[in-house]
Image (cartoon, rainbow, N blue to C red):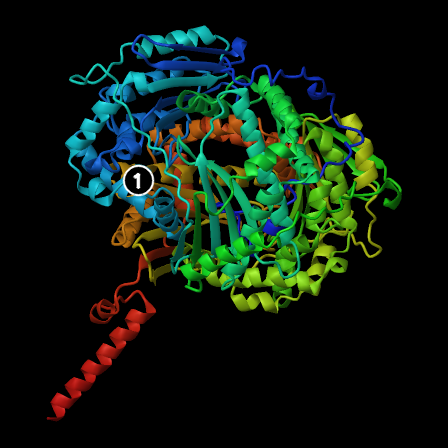
Amino acid sequence: MAEVDPPAPVAIEVDGEDTPPTSPRTSTSLPSSPMTPSIGGAVKSSGWKHLAPYPLDDRWDDVLALGPRDRCRAGTLANGMKFYVMRTFKPKDRASLALAVDVGSIAEEEDEQGVAHLVEHLAFRATESNENFHIVKFLESIGAEFGACQNAYTSMDETVYELTVPIDKPGILDEALSIMSEWVNKVRISDDDVRDERGAVLEEMRMGRDARGRSAEAYWKLLMSGSKYAERLPIGLQSVIKDGDPEVFRRFYRKWYRPERMAVVVVGDFPDLDGVAESIAKTFETCSPAPGQPVENPVVHRPTIAPHAAPRVTCDVDKEHTKTMVTVTYKYASGGISTPGGLFEKTVEEAFKLAIDNRLYKIMRKADPPFFSAACSVEDATRTTTMFSVQIVCDEGKVTRGLAAGLREMTRARLHGISEQELKIAAAKQLAEAEQLYVERDQTYCTSLRDELVGHFLRGELVVGAEEEARLSKACTEKMRTTHADAFGKKFSVDASCTIRVMEGRRSTTVEEIEAVVREIQREEDAGEITENAMFQVPSVVLKDEALPPPGRVTEERSFPSVGFEVLTLSNGMKVGMKTTDFLDDQVLVRCFAKGGLSEVPESEYLDALYANTIATELGIFGLKPEILSDVLAGKRCDVSSKTGTYYRRVDGDTSPTDIESGLQLIHALFTSNVRDMLVPEELEAVLRMQEQAIRNRSRNPNTLFHETIRYLAYGRSYMTRPLKPSDVRKMRPLRACEHFNASYSDPSEFAVALVGAFDADRVRPMLEKYLGSIPVPSDSKPHDSKPLTPATFKFPSGVVNKTIRVPMVEPMAMASIIFPINIPNPDHDAVTGEVVATVEGSAKIRRMKHISVTASGIIERRLLALLRFKFGEIYTCSAGASFSYQDQSAMVGDVIRGDVMISFSCDPDAGQRLAALALENVVDLIENGPTLEDVKTAVEVERRTLEVSAKENSYWREYFQALTNSRLAPVVDGDLDAIFELSERTREELLDGITPAIVREHLRECLKVQDRVVVVLRPRRALWRRVLTPDPTTAEGLVVMSCVGIAAWGVMRCFKRR
């Protein structure tokens, strides 16, 4: 299981994805107003300010050549297939490949709906030269990723196959190219292949048919009504997937998979571009259309979307919806970005979106706002149509109020445009992104460049190289004026292809009420009641120098060359570890962390502590209201947020090197501000209502109930993992929550700071003294190093816990999960005294056994995927992972180190218990007989390859510094981080070099306790008459029915005996 933090207060989704763990009303990354540059940028000039101007007007309609020329090769083979080769350096020794096929579900006939997607699945099953799942085994053997949605996708307009492979060993790239060449015209589509893959695709369909998926499908059909796009969703029809004639699949593949419709893309860390291009030509030049196909390449007809004057309105009610939302979508013809002029139009589009986002953000930050949250999105829905949407999360029963506010702002923008101030805000955001692109021009990930080249082939998108694109973007942003944004805003009228959708869990809004809102906004417009947007004041700085205490000073310095950190101790006791890297030239990651979290809080104060971060973030943790802070941070790449877990408190930051100072200012402000002073009950009320409704509504979601049940049962029914109830929100005391937050971030001597990225340590050091060293130590500060943390009330249950959750479902589906405890003997535990004294030898043993547990969980996952998907075809994907979150990892108290392994998958409603039993059998077999040598070799290769990439990421070293600092060995070795690091690395390398099937088997026999397990299966609730006639004994309801039947039968028998 993942790290066990308590159930968090609910985050609202505003754009179809989960928002970050901060409140959606308090994001610091929203566009805001420019401010003066940071005093003391931390790195040398990137050259951004001195970029040569781009002749935008002179090249407005030019179709630009692919670039940069010294790093790319492109061409067309004799068979019509295009190829693109490009060099990049990140990750090292990796290449990302794609085979792009210019055909998707829009090309399907009536009896082919779903065929394009299933053919994509079949490509990984077998080809003429690759037997069943050889391709998957090859990917796993080289440590490459394979999994759901990771290696291919099918959309309405295209199908794209993707591979990312290591290229440090001879032959791997050639073999990957060979596999791709077989996808062109040699995919095996036998009757048996189609039959065996149907189950996985049906399960994928079931997974996508949750409340959000059902609503999205219905909305798409309404948006595209009258067009073939409305009836060609890539997942297709169940009837075709389940019973379609295999010959139909073969016919589609032969017709559309032709080299003229394809491009091969290879991007990676290789210097010999011409050699790669030659390999592509050699591998693919013999590919040809299937025998019997016409010489001419068939044409895919991609219809345009007919405009409509009257707005289309729908009120979608689904009892599994977890929020009340209204979406307003405007459709217009896609312009494309194949020329500098096209990029300028996209720049204007994005600026307009950012300006509207900023307006909506300020509205939702008001007391008693008309909606909980709102944001815009822009999507090229098809090759011919773009959609601009405003998504508004509303108070339950108040959709019309939220919709009116959203439509009013769109109308205001159409009538009056956006102001110079708003454009300046948006431009600052865009320029910051363009600067980041330029600064990291030599560090673009191979997958990102691969995707750009795929877009170039399919849609003609510009690919000119990061430096040229930065020049272009800068020129477009600087050319932009309010008149351009105003002209773009004229598109957004409800009588110009507008569609409005309401999503509710319970009906409270009608189509007539929505139409009445539209008429009311039109009346306001006609009456001149919608005026220009008001100006707003923008502070210039987060902190004023005169308000700062005197700077602190560095009192101790220690250098740890093995791990690459220099650690400074400041005069207030705060420690700062600095590691300069060259992984990304425009990234510095910060983490300020301390031991002690929610486990230290008594149960009576738990809700106050749990909500402390949410409440404080909503009020303003940096001494400024969030909507003001977003203005202060205009044009800066600086995001800082706080989080409290079971055993820790931390503040995370992600900044540009030139914005480190702003990040450090925010940390200073967080420690020295009093959030209680920011408390305004009227403004807080909206947050409390949002939390109440979100908790109430998420109980409608079967998936949420499933995962909450797992947490609660697997962690011993602790109050810390009990699912939240709506009533809990009002039990929380806001003032006490504020006091808890203040106390959590008050004493700098409890905290250590990791600073990892591209910065100049000498230039940053004075900033550390000024902003972190000046944080005052409370007068009541106490020594804390030796204080043991309070264990959380987590305990894995004894015996077998079987739980079947039956809930009403709109679309029947099932999920299953099995959790086993891991109990690693603590070698440092004294059985006589009960004491634990950390030792180097004991820590190495614990590290080794935990690593074996993680390796074994990966083996379990791959074995189950092979069994349940590849052999039986009954699941789409599955997961298995090990976690050690029951106790504080730096303490390791007690005679065992406790963890767990959790297996999860979704499946057919009638298969949950049966497949769970098969999974259990597979795990038991692994324990009894051990893995195969191939299993172990694959696991080791995957781990090594994953580590190679991770070790070149700043986030890896930020996490590592925290682990080393908090290590149970730190006091033993006098804080020598190198000693702990070298022990950790040596233990891992020795294990990876020497691990065998016997080692895994013996470890599982000793530590994995299958006799204690939690099995949770989610199933749809049956009809009432079925539940009465055939009760389920695994449910409380079934037991009651059976008891009643038994009592009734006993009574009847007694009556007969008396007669």
- The three-letter amino acid code for the residue at tag 1 is Ile
Q: Nearer the viewer, residue 380 or 89?
A: 380
- x then y, percent, for residue 556: 82, 35
Q: Is residue 1023 above or below residue 211?
A: below
- x then y, percent, for residue 252: 22, 28
Residue 1012 visible from this viewpoint: no
- x then y, percent, for residue 574: 77, 42
* Residue 724 falls left or right of residue 861: right
Q: Is residue 235 above or below residue 321?
A: above
Q: Residues within 10 Å of mark 1 (few under 14, many from 20)?
A: many
- For disc 1, the marked residue is 235
The residue positioned farthest toward the left in the image shown = 1059
* Residue 441 falls left or right of residue 301: right
Q: Quadrant of residue 261?
A: top left
* Mark 1 secondary-structure assignment: loop
Residue 487 visible from this viewpoint: yes
The residue positioned farthest toward the bottom in the image shown = 1059
Q: Nearer the viewer, residue 141 or 800?
A: 141
The structure residue drawn at horizontal position 36% and vertical position 18%, both measured from the top left corner, is 263
* Residue 163 falls left or right of residue 922: right
